[in-house]
Amino acid sequence: MRSAVSAPLREAVNLQKALPVITSIAIIIGVAILRDRSKTLAAILATMPINIPLGLWVVFGVGDYDQDAAALFVRALAPGLVATLVWVAVVYALLRLGVTLWMSILGGYAVWAALVWAFIRAGWLVVPR
């Protein structure tokens, strides 16, 4: 038999797991709405550091977590951010060269994936379990 306390607790945990997804969807909708009104605001919303807190929330937000593990997770974000900045530079350069949007995005991801792989091999983008 289930206790009366377990059902509200289960619902709270399910809501906590769903909130990052709901937040991500809300941001995508916000960018879609803003693109017609202000491309500057859409760019700001698209680049705001929301994925990092969402990632922390998904990985460490439910239950007890190890403070050291969370710190190592955040430290591992730095090489990932470098790879992302290089992705932006590659996409920009390819678009300026006249490459189509989709091919520019794919080219950016190819360079990004190579950098992420190199960072993992170098031990810079690894979070111990």
Image (cartoon, rainbow, N blue to C red):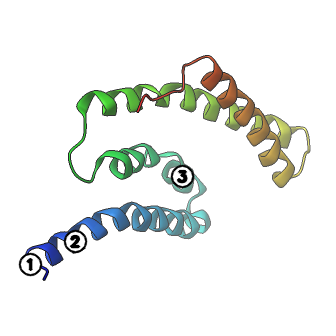
Precedes in sequence: disc 1 or disc 2: 1
Quadrant into which the N terminus falls: bottom left
Name the image quarter holding the C terminus: top left
Q: Amino acid at mark 1?
A: Ser
Q: Left of 117 or right of it: where is 79?
A: left
Residue 18 vs residue 114: left or right?
A: left
Mark before the other along the chain sequence, 3 or 1: 1
- Residue 35 in picture, x, y percent from top left: 60, 63
Mark 3 Cα shell of 10 Å, populated few (<14), some (14-19), many (≥20):
some
**Which mark identifies residue 3?**
1
The residue drawn where x is 82% and y is 41% is: 107
- Where disc 2 sits, the SS reads helix
Q: Nearer the viewer, mark 3 or mark 2?
A: 2
Query: Within 10 Å of the Cα at label 2, are there few (<14), some (14-19), or many (20+) other Cα atoms?
Result: few
Residue with the mark numbered 3: 46
The Cα atoms of the two marked residues, 3 and 1, are separated by: 43 Å
Tell me residue 74's x, y (percent): 39, 31
The label number, if any, that marks residue 10 in the structure image: 2
Image quarter for residue 49?
A: top left
Q: Position of residue 34 (x, y in %)?
A: 54, 65
Q: Is residue 36 shown above or below 46? A: below
Q: Nearer the viewer, residue 21 or 59?
A: 59
Which of the 4 image quarters holds residue 70? top left
